[in-house]
Image (cartoon, grey):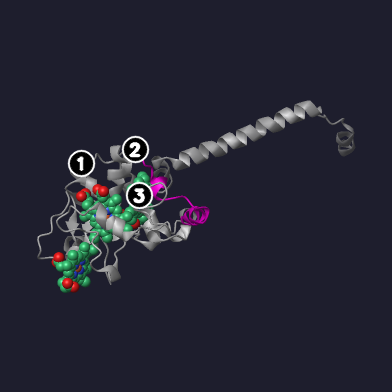
Amino acid sequence: MTEEKEEKRPRKRLDPKKKATILVAALVIVAAGGLGFWKWHETPGFCAAICHNMDQYLATYLEPQNAPGVDKYGNPVSNTNAMMSVLHRSNATTGKSEILCLDCHHAVIGEQVSEGMYWATGNYLDPLDERVGGHLTAWWKEDSTRFCANENCHAYLLGEDGLVDRSKLEQSTWMMEFNPHSQYHEAQQMECTACHKGHRASVQNCTSCHEHENIALPDGWITATESKELMEKTFVVD
Ligand code: HEC
Ligand code: HEC
Ligand code: HEC
């Protein structure tokens, strides 16, 4: 009986105008929420707030420039400018006031989803394996050098094919006594990130062979041997 009653109760109908207003309001709320989320997602704090194994990446990034500091594994770094995330965070020479995590690590939907899965399942590593070269651009399906040089960053190094022109790169540091970008060993070009490290001291990787030549290291940089020791200390190599 009660059922019948309920059925017969006149249902409220919204007049079309009101309906439209509510619909618009709802859309605005959803969009604002989404936008808010997206804005937050873009901020450096986001990654670390969601995933605690990102803490050390945020921490290195936020260290004062041109000062002693620590790397992502807690090792001392004699000059934080040797960590590219610190050097680039704010850089008068780039003309950009602030380079955020996602200016280097472009957000790609596939990667975000995969990170989300790891997060949801708790199935992630801490500390993370180090990403170098092609690992960093695998999700964008682009050449590894485009992590450092693309239309937005260091574009002056690009050749007509949109990839780093190694002779331009060589010229950019011609004044260094030992030019790290020398194309002498053209056949064995190194990845940019074999030397330029984001969250630990950068490595003068030519020293793996040219070790007795007293190559001057930029402030805070380390040799290939020091880098190897540091990684062996952090990760059990089997
Ligand atoms: C063998 C190690 C090594 C490799 C590989 C390497 N670099 Fe460098 N790079 C250096 C060193 C050392 C400096 C000098 C840094 C300093 O003085 O602080 C430098 C400086 C630079 C600079 C600043 C130059 C300037 O005008 O002051 C840029 C930009 C750069 N590298 C980009 C790249 C890119 C892009 C790649 C990959 C295509 C790359 N590097 C590969 C070692 C390397
Ligand atoms: C100037 C470019 C740059 C910026 C800005 C930057 N990174 Fe990186 N990041 C790198 C490079 C290069 C690597 C490769 C590993 C390394 O050199 O430490 C890397 C690696 C990583 C990795 C992979 C794990 C690993 O150890 O390789 C994570 C996670 C990461 N960064 C998070 C962040 C977060 C979070 C921020 C912002 C708080 C950030 N990065 C800002 C350049 C950058
Ligand atoms: C696998 C070992 C190895 C690595 C790594 C290596 N080199 Fe060399 N390099 C040599 C050897 C051996 C010679 C001397 C024989 C020759 O001329 O080929 C040499 C010679 C050179 C020369 C000419 C002679 C000189 O000493 O002035 C230059 C320039 C040079 N290397 C630059 C570099 C640069 C820049 C890097 C890093 C991007 C690098 N090398 C990395 C082994 C290496």
Mark 3 burial class by Cα count in 10 Å: few <14, some 14-19, many 20+ = some
Give the mark, 3 or 1, whose residue is nearer the N terminus.
1
Q: Which mark is residue 156?
A: 3
User: Label 3 amino acid?
Assistant: Tyr
59 with respect to 40 (left or right): left
Identify the element where label 2 is drawn: loop
Task: Give the residue at x 69% y 31%.
Answer: 24
Q: Quadrant of the C terminus?
A: bottom left
- Quadrant position of ligand 3: bottom left
Give the mark, 2 or 1, whose residue is nearer the N terminus.
1
Residue 200 makes an appearance in the image: no
User: Label 1 amino acid?
Assistant: Asn
Identify the element where label 3 is drawn: helix
User: Label 2 amino acid?
Assistant: Gly
Instruction: Look at the image and give the residue range highlighted in magenta.
Output: 97-118
Which percent across, then down, holds residue 90?
Answer: 31, 38
Q: Which residue is mark 1?
A: 66
Which percent across, then down, holds residue 152?
Answer: 41, 46
Task: Give the residue at x 23% y 45%.
Answer: 81
153 with respect to 238 (left or right): right
81 or 60, which is in the foreground? 81
Q: Which residue is mark 2?
A: 95
28 or 53, which is in the foreground? 28
